[in-house]
Image (cartoon, rainbow, N blue to C red):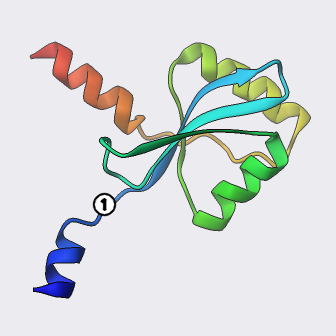
Amino acid sequence: MGIDAATSNRPEHPHVSITRVVRGRFVEFQFSLGDEDLVVELIMPPDPFAEFCRERGLPVHAAGDGVREAYGFLRRRHICLPELSETPDPVTAEDTRGSAA
């Protein structure tokens, strides 16, 4: 029961969803271990954000085209920042599926 029950409820796809770039100096984002009911909102300067994502091997998503553009601009100034994932943002994709039904 102990290990099987614990692992069966473990999230499978941890990720980061960037929600905005603040004043061109900070990355505001949601960190999820894969359970969209349990999300932590954080804000960090570019270098610590890059380290946070790199250490955890997290895919990075942007929550919309405006955020994607602002992050791209920030990334040109801070080459340490991770590239955005080409896969859909799990939060945005879920919202889209829900509204289509």
Residue 33 falls left or right of residue 95: right
Q: Mark 1 sits on what residue?
A: 11
Instruction: Please tell me whether residue 28 is drawn above or below residue 14 in the rendered image.
Output: above
Instruction: Please tell me whether residue 40 is drawn above or below residue 91 in the rendered image.
Output: below
Residue 12 percent location from the top left of the image:
32, 62
For the N terminus, give its image quadrant.
bottom left
Q: Residue at x 73, y 48 (%)?
A: 49
For the C terminus, give its image quadrant.
top left
Residue 95 percent location from the top left of the image:
28, 23
Count up the numbered dots: 1
Q: Amino acid at mark 1?
A: Pro
Instruction: Please tell me whether residue 101 is drawn above or below residue 50 in the rendered image.
Output: above
Q: Secondary structure at mark 1?
A: loop
Q: Residue at x 80, y 24 (%)?
A: 73
Q: Residue at x 42, y 35 (%)?
A: 89
Residue 89 falls left or right of residue 2: right
